[in-house]
Image (tube, coloured by chain):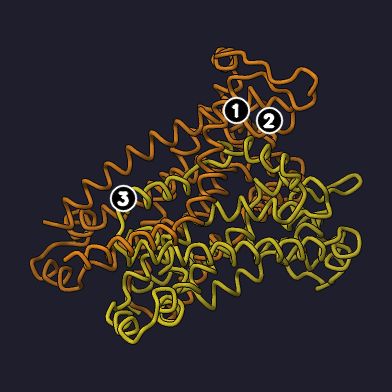
Amino acid sequence: MKPSKLLFYGIIFIIIFLSLLPFIWFVHTSLKTEGEVTAIPPKLVPSGSLNFYRSAITDYNLLHYVRNSVIVAGATTCVTLFISVFAAYALARLRLKYKGLIMGSLLLVSMFPQISIAGPVWKILQALGWLNSYQGLIIPYVTLTLPLGVWILTSFFNELPKELEDAARIDGCTRIQALYKIVIPLAAPGVFTAAILVFIYAWNEFFFALLIMTQQKFQTLPIGIALFQGQYTLPWGEIAAASTVATVPLVVVVFLFQKRIVSGLSAGAIKG
Amino acid sequence: MKRRHSSITKERIFAVWLLIPCFLVVCIFAFYPIVYSFFLSLHRIILGLPSIGQPFIGLENYRALLHDSIALRSLVNTFAFVFISTFFELLFGLIIALVINKHFMGRGLVRAAILVPWAIPTVVSSQMWRFICNDNYGLVNYILFGSDVAQYKAWLADPFFAFAAIVVADVWKTSSFAALLILAGLQTIPDELYETAKIDGANAWQRFRKIILPLIKPALLIALLFRTMDAFRVFDLVFVMTQGGPANSTNVLQFYGYKKIFAEGFMGYGSTISVLVFMTVFVLSLLYLRIIRTRLFAETVT
């Protein structure tokens, strides 16, 4: 092998190693036993015990957090996509004034630090009696993921040929029919990409979940992972187990759909 | 002519209808809260003392903010964090993008592998780095000192290293995002351009300086914008790893605001921090968008 090629693969190896090692170390920790977690030197081959998973489920209600996260992230994805499909269609396809302004202000929303709206959002939800409720968390998530959804879908809709739609209109379809019979099926890859990104955002979000879900009954997985507390020490094994459970689905999605994710991220950022 | 005109109007009205749900959500839960934050910041509101009501106190909270040394510290920390972490993220992002832009076997798998840190929930990566920095059995101590337990250091209890740990955790998690944005820019450069330059005798560094760098400038600027704004929001890392300590060395605006409003209940005073953060980000993003717009158009047209 030529030295330049060796160097190239060396760098690739370092990049992959550094990207994956910290997380693999955590997965590795989750498979140890109580004694192995604190062992010095660290044990390189864990005993493969599933004890931490068992106690995360029985002592720390892991499944209950998973359920809440699935509900909140799932509902957020559906609502955000539903609203963004309409908005993106209008922005990509119809004659409309102030398109630039609308896209710009959506971009601005996606850049807010959460603290700049946190107090008022909390007060509004309190007035509605929606603190510690699923809708109380879903609504802020929909607000924060709408820009992402609209930007990605607008860029996908823009790339579809307009003729098919016109043909459908001539055949007597209304605009709404043309949208859900022609445009959405054609843009299905784009809708799917947007769904993945919105879901990941909602699944990972911590700040609003922390403010709004103060009762354990409604808390999502990130809150659980951040607040697990043992009697005297931190339950590292259970934290690692819960972290693995929270992350593995995302890792699977990334490996299956990396192309789509990359195109979605760059569609949202570059083409706009 | 008249018919055509009315069909355009119809189309516009239809478009507005389609935008209404989006518009309503964003107005009620994003724009209105920003204005409302400003309103709250002019009042004395203490969540634990509902009996005092919401007396209007003018700019009193802002005057207090000017004399609040912890707020100042958080502001400085936030800017330091944004600057340092964004710098390294763009640097590593650029390196990763240049490497994976080549055609080689297993490129898709490599791309997926570098996306893993991006996809991990920030709370998870925070706990992970906290564990790695643990004073008794963390990986950092073991790598540096082996089994010599006497030398082990409590990294997160040291102001300098705690700050560094948060920067490292952020750079680790988000360099890949920067890399992807830069990669998208790199892929717009036609291969022939490299070939011609190579034939003309340009070495690798010259090709990078004279061809690649100018052409990916728009992508770099966009990555810079997204990373700056995102770094401004840093919260999860601080909440999980250090709680702003030791001695406020890792306190940042978003965390300080959260603490004032929700942990201590000073809704009025905490809202001044919300307003300050919003204003800073607003001005910064307008500035960036201005630069990006002019650059983008200037360079894609010519």
For the residues tagged 1 and 2, is the chain the same?
Answer: yes
On screen, residue A41 above or below B295? below
Residue denoted by label 1: B271
Give the chain letter at badge 1.
B
Chain letter for the orange colouring in the rendering = B
Residue denoted by label 2: B261
Mark 3–mark 1 distance (CA, rounded to whole Å) = 31 Å
**Left or right: A159 as drawn, with respect to A34:** left
Disc 2 residue type? Ile
**Left or right: A200 as drawn, with respect to A93:** right
Residue denoted by label 3: A98
Q: Quadrant of residue B44?
A: top right
The mark found on residue A53 in the picture is none
Mark 1–mark 2 distance (CA, rounded to whole Å) = 7 Å
**Left or right: B243 as drawn, with respect to B188:** right
Q: Residue furthest front?
A: B2
Q: Secondary structure at mark 3?
A: loop
On screen, residue A260 above or below A91? below
Tag 1–tag 2 contact (CB < 8 Å): yes
Q: Residue furthest left?
A: B200
Disc 1 residue type? Ser
x%, y% of residue B146?
70, 52
Q: Residue at x 41, y 60 (%)?
A: A151
